Image (tube, rainbow, N blue to C red):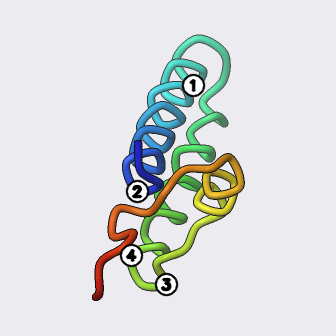
Amino acid sequence: MTVERGVRLMAGFVILLSFALAHYLSPNWLWLTAFVGFNLLQSAFTNWCPVMSIFRAMGMKDANCGTAE
């Protein structure tokens, strides 16, 4: 799995989890969804989000590893 795919997987999981928590516990969990959305938005412009650093430290490779941009 690549870092980019891992970020999408993690974002999707956290969004679904926050919707479930908002439904069963408190609507305040929707702030977590907003936080994930904001991070995805800023990563579209900066090509960086906190989870990318964590996944790289875990040994995941970038999708363009070994190719020129």
Specify the label residue 36 is tagged with: none
Q: Residue at x 54, y 64 (%)?
A: 39
Going from N to C along the chain, the mark reached first, 2 or 1, is: 2
Residue annotated with mark 4: 44
Query: Hey, what amino acid is under mark 3?
Result: Thr
Judge left or right: residue 40 versus residue 63.
Answer: right
* Callout 4 touching callout 3 (CB < 8 Å): yes
How packed mark 2 is, by other alpha carbons closer than 10 Å (few <14, some 14-19, many 20 or more), is some
Q: Residue at x 40, y 56 (%)?
A: 4
- Residue 29, quarter of picture: top right
The location of residue 1, given as percent across then percent down, is 41, 41
Circle 4 — which element?
A: helix
How packed mark 1 is, by other alpha carbons closer than 10 Å (few <14, some 14-19, many 20 or more), is some
Residue annotated with mark 3: 46
CA gap between label 2 and label 1 equals: 27 Å
Circle 1 — which element?
A: helix
Going from N to C along the chain, the mark reached first, 3 or 1, is: 1
The location of residue 10, given as percent across then percent down, is 50, 40
Residue annotated with mark 1: 22
Query: Hey, what amino acid is under mark 1?
Result: Ala
Query: Hey, what amino acid is under mark 2?
Result: Glu
Pick the front one: 69 or 30:
69
Q: Quadrant of the C terminus?
A: bottom left
37, above or below 26, in the image: below
